[in-house]
Amino acid sequence: MAREPGNQFDPEGRHRRSIRLKGFDYTQASAYFVTIVAYQRECLFGEIENGEMRLNDFGKIADECWCAIPIHFPHVELGAHVVMPNHVHGIIVIAPDISVGARHASHLQSPPHGAPPGSLGAIVGSFKSAATRRIGREQNPSGIWQRNYYEHIIHVQREMNTIWRYIEANPSMWDDDEENPR
């Protein structure tokens, strides 16, 4: 079956496979290491000078939106984070939600599309949307973010400490970073 020009949806074509852990509940209390990459790995957020990140206006907006996550998601705490020239690394901790019983008592279902409310996907999606809105498509019409994001579930404190140090040291390792376009 031939597609019409401009029609992006192909019901018979390949579907994107999820990179999430199958069967894992991303609304549950846990710590997550997240990496969100700029569209086409463009260096939109600033530059590294002498091993330190110097945020430009877009980078400052991304940083402000990241720091505002707990305002919009009160059950979330943030760990270390860094806005790099073309990506953001951060630790998101979803705390136990004391209202879970009441929320589930009404048997609410997940939305038919998109991430369940309060999930890691909803948190990351909200961050990306807020930064995109504030930066504005008129300032960067090609887009701000790659589709999707990378996450790693942090299981033990030793792992948390290692990731925390990695995030804090990331600007000093930019020359060897796989996200560095050079």
Image (spheres, helix red, strand yellow):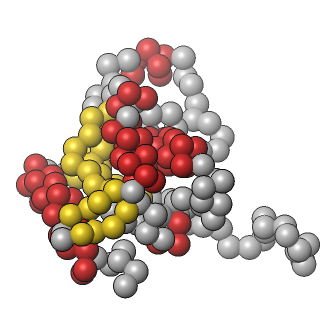
Instruction: Judge by depth and name the residue closer to the eye, 137 or 163.
Output: 137
Kindly identify the residue that appears in the image at 25 percent across and 74 percent down.
174
Which quarter of the figure is the N terminus placed in? bottom right
Is 43 drawn above or below residue 36 in the view shown?
below
* Left or right for 49, reference 112: left
Is 156 drawn above or below residue 52 in the view shown?
above
Which quarter of the figure is the C terminus placed in? bottom left
Kindly identify the residue that appears in the image at 10 percent across and 54 percent down.
161
Instruction: Judge by depth and name the residue closer to the eye, 109 or 138.
Output: 138
Query: Where is residue 55, by image quadrant?
Result: bottom left
Instruction: Judge by depth and name the residue closer to the eye, 87 or 164.
Output: 87
* Left or right for 50, reference 93: left
Kindly identify the residue that appears in the image at 45 percent across and 53 percent down.
58
Is 167 drawn above or below residue 73 in the view shown?
below
Q: Is residue 166 visible?
A: no
Kindly identify the residue that appears in the image at 64 percent across and 53 percent down.
137
* Left or right for 65, reference 107: left
Is 16 drawn above or below residue 101 in the view shown?
below
| Residue 25, image x, y percentages | 40, 43
| Residue 9, image x, y percentages | 78, 65
Q: Is residue 112 visible?
A: yes
| Residue 177, image x, y percentages | 28, 76
Task: Point out the residue furthest to the bottom here.
Answer: 182
Count of residue discs: 0
| Residue 154, image x, y percentages | 22, 52
